[in-house]
Amino acid sequence: MDDKEVIWKCRRGTKELDILMSGFFSKYYKTASDKQKNAFIELLSLEDPVIYDLLLNKISSKDIAVNEIADMIRTMSLKEQ
C-alpha cells in the first residue's frame, strides 16, 4: 500500500482518531520497520470502536504487532499532553 492510501485510511469517523492516526503516520511511519508498517495498516483496517478499545487498553489484538503499534500511539499521545 502506498503512502497516499495509508494517509487516506488515517481519516477516521472521529476527529480524535484522525489526530492520533495521522499523528502516528507523520511522526513514525516513514522510519518504521516493514513489520510496524504492516501492523499499522492492519490497525487501520479495524472498525473505529475496536481501535478505541485497543488504544484505551480495554482489549488486546491477537496480533502482537498491532498491540505494539497501539502502545506506540498511546505513548505518543501521552507525550503530547
Image: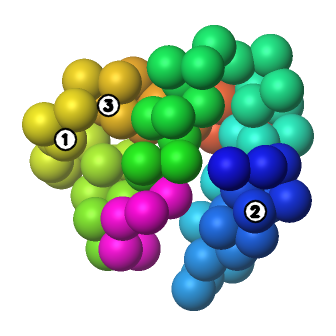
Q: In the image, is residue 44 above or below residue 16? A: above
Where disc 1 sits, the SS reads loop
Q: Which residue is depicted at the point 28% across and 65% down?
A: 50
Q: Given contact means CB atoms under 8 Å apart, are the residues at marks 1 and 3 in contact?
A: yes
- The residue lying toward the viewer, choosing from 66 and 33, is 33
Q: In the image, is residue 68 above or below residue 33? A: below
Q: Given contact means CB atoms under 8 Å apart, are the residues at marks 2 and 1 in contact?
A: no
Chain-order first, disc 1 or disc 3: 1
Three-letter code, disc 2? Glu
**Image position of 69 (left or right of 24):** left
* Number of residues whose C-alpha sits closer than 10 Å to that of mark 3, classed few (under 14), some (14–19) or many (20 or more): many
**What's the distance in space between the residues labelled 2 and 1, CA to CA?**
23 Å
Q: Residue furthest bottom?
A: 13
Q: Measured from the top left, where is residue 7 in percent x and y?
A: 79, 60
Report the residue marked by disc 2. 5
Report the residue marked by disc 3. 67
Where disc 2 sits, the SS reads helix
Report the residue marked by disc 1. 61
Chain-order first, disc 2 or disc 3: 2
- The residue lying toward the viewer, choosing from 81 and 63, is 63
Q: Measured from the top left, where is residue 19 in percent x and y?
A: 74, 61
